[in-house]
Structure formats: structure tokens, C-alpha cells
Amino acid sequence: MSTEQGPLILVVDDYEDAREMYAEYLRFCGFRVAEARNGNEALEQAFTLMPDLILMDLSLPGMDGWEATRQLKADERTRQIPVVALTGHALAGASEGAKRAGCDSFVTKPCLPDDLVVEVRRMLSLARPA
Amino acid sequence: MTSLQARTLSRATVTAPAASRLELLEYYLVHNEDIAGCAQASVEWLGRYAGVKRSVCLAVDNEAGVLTGIAGYGVPGHEVDLFTWPLADTRDPLVATLGAAAPVVFRSGKVVEQFGRATPTTPLGAGPFTVIPLRGTQQGEALGLLLLRPWSGSSADVSWLATVLGQKVEQIRGRGSLTEDVRKLRRERALFFTIINSVTDPILLTDTEGRLIVANARAEKLFAASEEESEGLRRAVELNNMLFSAALSRTAVESPAAARELLLVDPSDGSDLLFEVLSTTVEDPREGTGIVSVLRNITDLRRATEQIEENYQRLRVLEAAARAERDRLNLIIDSVADPIIVTDPVGETVLMNAPAEELFTVAPEAPDSAERSVQSNDAHFSSFISGLLLGETGPGAIRRGEIVLVHPNSADWIPVEAIAGKVLTDSGELTAVVTILHDRREALERARLYEQLKLASDELQGRVQAATAELATQNELLRRQAIELEQASRLKSQFLANMSHEFRTPLNAILGYTHMLLQGVAGDLLPAVKRQLQRIDSNGKHLLTIINEILDITRIEAGKMPMQLSEFNVNELVPEVMAELDAVIARSKLTVTPHLSSEVPLVFSDRQKVKQIVVNLLSNALKFTHQGSIEINVEFDLGTHQASIVVTDTGIGIAAEHHERIFEDFRQVDDSPSRQYGGTGLGLAICRRLAMALGGRITLHSTVGQGSSFTLTLPVEAPQ
């Protein structure tokens, strides 16, 4: 499928169908993918794998996406990793909340895999200009 | 016999006895044939020239057998005239003295030593006196007595006079029956004095110079006083004589017969006495001219006149006051609207005011029944006040009662409240009864109306209370409902927000996997499978649109629709919208023509929302147009400074009655379950709300069967 050297994307979502769908499509598009089901796992994976980008669903059991993002952005090691927030809550204030938590980008569900990949690529290019 | 007594003040005392003796003899005794006249001249001569202040002359009347007073000086004249003394008792001192050769002294209150009998009472009054027998030339019993006081008993003048007078008496007696004449004269004189003394008014005869000649008893009290009287009395008498003389001289000068008033002093008590003086001049051939004056005491009359005048004046003042009072009272009584009747103690009406007259008198042109009504009223009224008139109640008592009268003209029954009071004099005597009648119809009617009003008011109050209670209940219910509604609304918004999230999660997966399959993630697809996947994708996206619209409404309702204002060119939106709907346009086979504007300036608004509205409008146009064309016009109004985007179609059109309805939530023209056109019916509702949030509006022009024209108008700058 994709090369082993593709950027590593950490997909954090408690809803397995969505998480696996995005993971599968990202791999299909040539990315390396790691998965986490909640905030704690996300932090653990991030510190361990140091991914190039994190797709973070905000509504998570246990530690939620906002808290996880805050901790990632508060840590020297993970601060520079772009975090793209994913949320099904499209109410006003949701995107502002995400940005305050330190998210670099914000994507509303439903989001077609294709659109997500476009956003991922855009963020990666911003983080690591060629 | 009286007169010319010592009180004549004008005549000076003569001190030449020889001349005076001659005068007496010449003028009085020689030519005078009257014993009384000679005696009187003699005693006066004694008083004047011999210092005998009081004297009485008595003559023997043998036929009557008495001694009789014939002249007096310094004593009341009538006492002398009326004095008689019986000759029968020869041992009586006076009778005995007739036989005496020399004067006899009678001492006051003592036994006359010579005769051993008590001193008799004579006109000389109490006190010692001397009695001289009067004899002629013949010896024997004396012809009379001369009583003198005081007299020392050794005066030559007295002795001379006694001799002269005695001889004169003898001479006159010797000529015959003169005694009879004297007696007759005495009787006449006595009668005369009796008459004038019986007159209570003072009567005086004076000479023209005011000297008193004759006075009756009443006059003597005013004008004569003996030496024994008190100093004050004598002075008063003196004053009265002066006043009287002055009055007489005035009368003589002015009008002799006229009555005039004279103020004198009552010598007995010093009080003023007012007299009316009537003076008449009398001519007597022997005595000369004299003046008779009658004094009428008008002191009481004057006092009474003055009193009457005073009373009359007072009465007039009182009468005027009473008249004014009565006028005022009449005015008051007549101005009182209630009938007032004043009744005298026997029940007769003495006064009534106009309202009372209406009830108790028959008007000239009143109907026949009026008289019966008045009689009936009279009867009722009389029966009402009879108690007061009969004195059933105490003084000052008020009687109250209700009687029913009949109005004489209208024959209406008039219930009246009667109030009657007694009018009493100071002594408590009933003089009148005053009755006031008060028409109670108005009061009764008012009471009835008040009762009705009270009932109505109570009822109303009850109703108001019930309504208020009901209202409070309703309010409470509404308040609860409002709270519930608010809660429900909040819950609905929350629910919809949650639901949209819940919808999106599975839809995300459906659309995502469909997309992945169509992208060939699972390898190449059979054309049929690919077509079927496209159907899934299309329906999934439609479902997503519906969910998004519901979410938009929810956001707007919750006031949480975020606005992201920026500056952009409206013209740019048109191709973007068309591009977004490219697939639909292609499928519709309609021509969509954009007409952009070069005049429209950049607007400051929410680009995404404006685009969403235009997408919606174009989407609707495509949906409801089966043939023809669609035009999109961008315009700018310089006057209002507003930009607009107009989407005009040639579709089915919208009836005028539905123009407003289509902007309501979840509304389409056809709401029925079997409706031809799909969609949530939220599109226009959302568009209108978004437009309003941006300070603009959406308007519609449409004709059924010819097409519709939706215009989005936006201000150049949206409100913040």
C-alpha cells in the first residue's frame, strides 16, 4: 500500500467504526496510522510514538479530547505535533473551545475520508514546510 | 277770715305808730261797716305795727250762743273761719274772759290759773297766748275776744286797738241786725273755702304784683310757711313764691290767658313738682284787679308722658327690629325647600311657607280631588300635632313622626317625616308649634337604589373575586406552563443538538465507507454495485442536509449561530453556488443564467451564511421548476445602499395566501404526507432568519403557474 516512510498519524476516537474507517483510508492514502480510544491512550501513544499529526475526537470517555490536547500542548516533547480536532458537535463555541485547548485545526463530522486527508495534508505541510 | 298774711313780702314794716293808727282808723275802721272786715284790718295792723305775729279775733253771737272766729293773722284762714266756741259754759276760761276787766294770759298746756280750767285749743296752736276782752263804751259782757301771741301784755298799741275795735264793734252792733249779715257772710265764706279746699289743685288769688290774697289749702302748702316750720321748708316756700311771681309777671307781659308750665319745689320733701299754670285776670270793683291762678300738677303727667314717649321710641325700635327679624324669618322660611307650618295653640295655622301652601291649600285651578287631598292632609297634620298642643310632651320637646300626605295637584302619595317643636314664651306658655315636613321620597328612593347598588356591587365583587381567583389560577398555570415550555424548549434544543450528534456519528461512518468503496479502497467495483453505492451516498448526503438544517434552526433558536464577518464581493458567490449545485443543475436540464453587477461594492457580512442562503434559494428554484429557466441577478441600490441577489424561476409559483406561510418552520405549500416535493421545509425559514441576523431580508414576488422571484437584500455592512 503506502511506503513505510509515510507520516505517522495518531487517530483518536472512541467510536470504533469511525476510527477504523479513517485509519484504513489514511493507510490507503499512504500514511502510517496509530490508534487510540481515549485521552489516556492518546497521551501514552503520543509520548511513545511521537506521531507527525494527531486526529483528535473531542468527545471521549475518561479523559476527553480537550484535556488530552491541553496536556499534549503543555509538554515540550509533543507541543509541536499538530492536533486536528474532530467533533460531531457543531454548535457554536465548539471550534473556539477546541482552539483554546490548543488544537491547530478543526473538522466537523461527518467528514468524508477524502476531505479529512486533504486537511491532514494541509496541516502537515504547514507544520513541516518542504 | 283770712288773708293778707305775713307772707306778703313786698310791703315794708312801718315804724310810725301814730301815722299807722290814723291810717287804720281812716281807711279801715271809720268807713267799714263790716265787723269781720274791721277785725281783719285790726289784726293785720297788730301784726304789722305791734309785732303780734299771730292773732285771732272772736265775736259773740248771742243768737247762736257761741263765740265765732271772724279774723286771723298768722294762722290758717280756714281754721279761723271754722272756729266756734260755746257760750253756755260760763266757767269756761274763754267764756269767763268775756267778763274779765283786764287781759288774761293762757299758758300752754296748763290750767288757766284764774278759772281753774285747762287752756282751750285755738287756731293759735300750742303755746301761751293772751286774751283781751273787746268792749264798747257800755259796761257789761264783752262783745268779743282778741287772742294774741306772743304779747307781753303791756303794749299801748294793743290796748289802743282793743279799745278802738271794741267801740267799732259796739257801734256796728248798735245799728241793728248786722249780726245776721255777718253770719250769712261767714257761711258763704265757709262754703267758699270748703269748695276751693276740696280742689286738689292749688288755687291762688293774687294781686297784679304777685301778692297772695286767697289760697286754698293745697296752695298754702306750697306758698305759705309759719315761723315754726323748718328752715328748709321756709326757704322752699320762699323760692316757690319767687318762681310764681316771676311766672305771673311773664304771663302779664306775654299772653295772660295762656297756660304755662311752672317748676316748683315740694316744701315737704324737696322734690321737683311741675305745674301747668292757668292764670285769669279778675276785676273786682272793691278789691281791684287780681289774678286767679290754678296750678295743675303735671309732674306725674309729664313723667308719664316722658315715659310713654320713651316707651314708644323703644317700642318703635323693637318693632323695627321685630319687622326685620320677621322679614328675615320669612325669607328663611320661604327659602327652605321643605314645607314649614306654624300653628297657634288652638291648632290654627298662622304661617306656612310656599312648599307648605302647595300641600295645604287648594290652588285656584286645581282639580276637584285637590280639595279632598288638602282635607286629608289637614287631618293627618292635625292629628300629628294634637299631642303637642294638648301638652302630652314636656316643654321644648320635639315630636317626630311619619305621615303620608297627598299632593293636591298630582295626587301623588308623599311620605314625609314630620318634626314639630313647641315655641314657648319666657314664662313657659305655649305660643306656637312649628312643624317641618321633610319629603322622604327621595331618601326612600335613594335607599332603594343604594340597596340595589349594594346588591349589584356585592355580586360584582363576588364575580371579580372569582375572576381574580380564576385569573390567579390561570396565571399560575400559565407560569408553570411557561416554565415547562421553556424547559421543554431547552430540552428540545438540547435534544436536537444531541440527536444531530448522534445522527452524525453513524452517518459519518455510512458516508465515509460508501465514499471509500466508491474511491476503490476495496478494489474495482461492478458498475451495478457502483451505481447502488452512489444511491447510498446520495441519500446519505440528503439525510445529512436535513440533519444540518435541523441543527441550524436549533442554533438560531438557541442564539448560538456564530457569525463570522468578513469583507467579500457578492458577485463571487454566484459561480460558487452554481458550482456547488452543478450536479443538480445538470440533472434539471434548466438553464441557469447569472447577471453580475459591477456597481456593487464589497460587503461586510458572513460570507458562509450568505452563500448558504443563495444555495438554498437556487436549490428551491431548481426543485420547483420543471421547465424554462432560472436567472440569478446581483444588484445594488444606490439610494438605500443595499446589495441584493435575486433568484427568478419559471416554476410552479406560489399563491399569494401562501407567501408568508412558506417562511415558517417545517412548512411547504403542501404539508400533506403525500406531498410531491421533498425537503424538511426548513430551508426558507432558516434563510429568512439568517438574512435577518445579517440585517437583511428575503422578499417574494410570485404568480401561480408563472414562476417565483426571491430577493435577498443585504446591507453593505451587517450589524455586529
Image (tube, coloured by chain):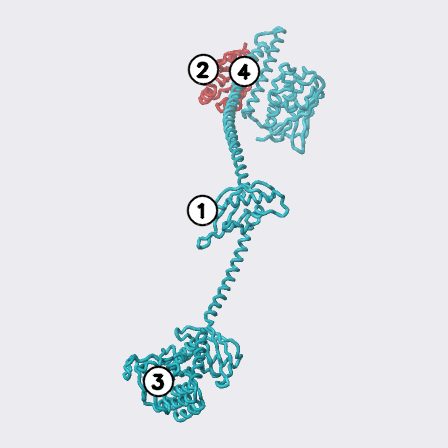
Q: CA distance from mark 1 to mark 2?
A: 120 Å
Q: CA distance from mark 3 to mark 2?
A: 190 Å
The answer for which chain carries disc 4 is B
Front in this rendered view, residue B400 or B484? B400
For residue A41, the mark is 2
Q: CA distance from mark 4 to mark 1?
A: 107 Å
Q: Which chain is red?
A: A
Dot 1 crowding, Cα within 10 Å, few <14, some 14–19, many 20+: few
Q: Are marks 4 and 1 on the same chain?
A: yes
Q: Are marks 4 and 2 on the same chain?
A: no
User: On the image, numbered disc 4 is attached to which residue?
Assistant: B503
* Amino acid type at mark 1: Thr
Q: Residue A29, relative to residue B25: is it above or below?
A: above
Front in this rendered view, residue A77 or B629? B629
The answer for which chain carries disc 3 is B
Q: Are marks 3 and 1 on the same chain?
A: yes
Task: Tell me the element at label 1.
Answer: loop
Would residue B243 be found to the left or right of residue B340 on screen?
Answer: left
User: On the image, numbered disc 3 is attached to which residue?
Assistant: B148
User: On the image, numbered disc 1 is attached to which residue?
Assistant: B393
Question: In x, y percent, where is residue B653?
Answer: 69, 21
